[in-house]
Image (tube, rainbow, N blue to C red):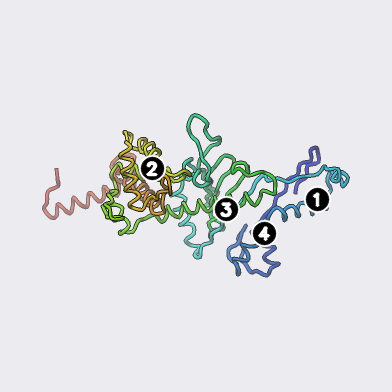
Amino acid sequence: MKICSYFPYPIKVWVNGHEWAKRQARRAGIGFAELSNGFASCTDPAALQAICDQLGPAQIQAFCHRWLDALPTPLSEVDEVGGYWWEFSMRQIETSRTIVFHAPRHARAFFEALVADNLDVGRPDTVEIIFDRQIRTGPKRATPGVFKTKVVTRGVDVTVNAFYRHSRIKQYLKDGRALRIETVINSPTDLRVGRRLHHLDELQGKARAINNRLLDTERVGQGCVLASPAFARVAHPTIEEGRRAPALRFGDPRVMALAGALTTCVHAVTGLSNRSLRALMTGLLGAPYSIGQASYDLRRLRLKGLIARQPHSNTYTLTPDGLRFAIFYTKVHNRVLTPLLAADQPAAPPPLRQALRTIDQHLNDYLAQARLPAAA
């Protein structure tokens, strides 16, 4: 607690919820193993979570008043009776989720792969999914703030930050054995929550939802590979609901644009409509995209189970299979095929060019030994 000695006598209070929870857990007889700022394991996870949920405005207010009674302050009891006293508000709230690995030796390799696949988490279209807030990027009425991903490296430790207005969500490896996802709210109004302390529970709920959305997004991104039957159902014509469902063939420009449109519109609270799909597809294809084409594509997406129609409306929402389809198609196309197809160009990584030259040389040698002439 820091009390300023000159008017208007502002006070700053820092509260570490993890340390408070550790004290309460010891008092309740719950055994646990510590992280540097958290828990690695415990004997009763449900009871520990209940303790963490108890930390709220009443406990923090009691902590503040206990120290105000013990420390010398510029205001006296007479001032308090006269209505001159402090009212506490939230300046910065950090809400975390910690996922501990059973085999810590795999933690760093997993985290490095996770970072490499999610460097675009700070893009506006991704940040608004995670924070569940609409971001306008047009020239008129643009949402204030810089939306970006920032990677901070200290020694061998890496922290990935995604920013939304005054707030951010970050993830890093805790003590080499746990994935820490942490939402840092520097201004509660970013989430349309009041600043006063009694709004803490509401803010905590929204911050935990942000942590969960980031985790869900990354889980889908890491586990989006379609099994052979599922891939065949999407990539080939099938009969669904007694009707023929046209194929969504990988590599087809219109299908790839359709997958990109689905990843872009996943944040849309109002759902996907014929009109919104036309706007997205026109930009992705760089060519006109008609109402009839949009109706045809929406029909085959629905029959394949990739989108679901909302009751009593002409709008659609993305299903879990639809999200996997969109991420799988776009990820394989952008991160595998595009670099490989451009491998003979100077922009390709030198190790890849060297590997392809080696393969080409071995093939030529094998054909020469088989007395088969190389193609002109």
Identity of the residue drawn at 47% across and 50% down = 115
CA gap, disc 1 to disc 4? Answer: 22 Å
Say which amino acid is labelled 2: Ala
* Helix, strand or loop for disc 2: helix
Q: In this rendering, is residue 31 above or below 181?
A: below
What residue did someone put label 3 on? Answer: 208
CA gap, disc 2 to disc 1? Answer: 56 Å
Q: Nearer the viewer, mark 1 or mark 4?
A: 4
What residue did someone put label 2 on? Answer: 261
Residue 2, percent from left and from top:
75, 46
Identity of the residue drawn at 70% across and 48% down = 197
Residue 152, percent from left and from top:
53, 46
Residue 71 placement, left or right of 190: right
Q: Which mark is residue 68?
A: 1
- Whichever of labels 1 and 3 marks the residue nearer the N terminus, that label is 1
| Dots 1, 3 in contact, CB < 8 A | no
Say which amino acid is labelled 3: Arg
Quadrant in the picture for the C terminus: top left
CA gap, disc 4 to disc 2? Answer: 43 Å
Say which amino acid is labelled 1: Leu
Residue 92, percent from left and from top:
65, 46
- Whichever of labels 4 and 2 marks the residue nearer the N terminus, that label is 4
Q: Badge 2: how crowded within 10 Å, few (<14), some, or many (20+)?
A: many
Residue 41 placement, left or right of 138: right
- Whichever of labels 1 and 4 marks the residue nearer the N terminus, that label is 4
Say which amino acid is labelled 4: Gln
Identity of the residue drawn at 83% across and 52% down = 69
Q: Nearer the viewer, residue 135 or 14?
A: 135
- Whichever of labels 4 and 3 marks the residue nearer the N terminus, that label is 4
- Whichever of labels 2 and 3 marks the residue nearer the N terminus, that label is 3
Q: Which mark is residue 54?
A: 4
CA gap, disc 1 to disc 3? Answer: 31 Å
